[in-house]
Image: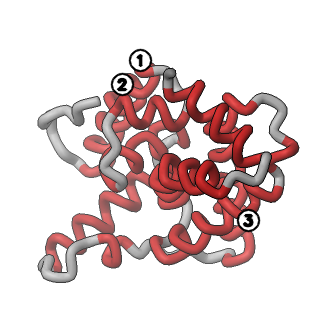
Amino acid sequence: MDEGGTTAVLVLAARGGDAAAVRSLYVRFARVVHGVLLGYVQHADADDLTQDVFQTALQRLSELREPAAFPGWLLRIARNAALNRLRQARVVEIDAASMVDGSAGPDTRLEAQQALAAIRNLPEAYRETLMLRLVEGLSGPEISARTGLTPGTVRVNLHRGMGLLRRALGIGATREVEA
C-alpha cells in the first residue's frame, strides 16, 4: 500500500477513535508540521504549536472530506496556527540560537541566526521545503510523501530555494542539497 493510501486508512481509523491510528498519524507528520511552523515562529513556539495543530486536526477530523488529503489539510492548519501566533505576538524575534548545539561557538550561532532569517524571508514553498530538509532532516521522498507534493516539485523547491538562500547569504555555488 502506498503512503497516501496508508494515510487515508489511518485517518479513517482515527475518525473511529483508534488511538493507535492517531499515534501513527502524529509520528508520521509531527516533524513536517514542526518544520513548517519553524518557517514562521520561534523554536519554542513551534514545539507548542505542533501539539496544538494536532489537537485541532483531531477535533476537526470529521470535517476532512477526503482522507487522502490529510497532509495538505494538516499543513494548512499548521500555517494558520503560525500566522495566528504571529498576529498575537506582533513582534517575533528569531531564536536560531536554540536550534544550534549548545557547544557551538558564537560564530556558528550567528551563522544559524542569519540562515534562519534568510530562510524565513523566502517564498513559502521554498521556506517550508528547506525547513523540512535542513532543520527536520527529512529526505526528498519523505517530504513528498508527507506534504502531498510530487517528488519533482520537492526537487525543484529544494534546488530553487537553496539558490535563493545562497544568494541571500552571499554564498557562491556550493554542494546541492540532495532530494
Side (left or right) of 73 relative to 115: right
Q: Position of residue 160 (x, y in %)?
A: 36, 29
Q: CA distance from mark 2 to mark 3?
A: 30 Å
Question: Mark 1 and mark 2 in contact (Cβ < 8 Å)?
Answer: yes
Q: Which residue is mark 1?
A: 152
The image shows a total of numbered marks equal to: 3
Neighbor class of circle 2 (other Cα within 10 Å; few <14, some 14-19, many 20+) is many
Q: CA distance from mark 2 to mark 1?
A: 5 Å
Q: CA distance from mark 3 to mark 1?
A: 31 Å
SS type, badge 1? helix
Q: Amino acid at mark 1?
A: Gly
Q: Residue at x 49, y 53 (%)?
A: 27
Q: Position of residue 178 (x, y in %)?
A: 23, 32
SS type, badge 2? helix
Q: Amino acid at mark 2?
A: Arg
Side (left or right) of 53 relative to 56: left
Quarter of the image that includes the C terminus: top left
Q: Which residue is mark 3?
A: 84
Colour mode of the rendering: secondary structure
Q: Amino acid at mark 3?
A: Asn
Task: Establish if 178 lies above or below 20.
Answer: above
Task: Establish if 139 lies above or below 37.
Answer: above
- Pick whichever, 160 or 50, lies toward us: 50
Q: Which residue is mark 2?
A: 155
SS type, badge 3? helix
Q: Mark 3 or mark 1, which has the lower sequence index? A: 3
Whether residue 25 appears in this view of the structure is yes
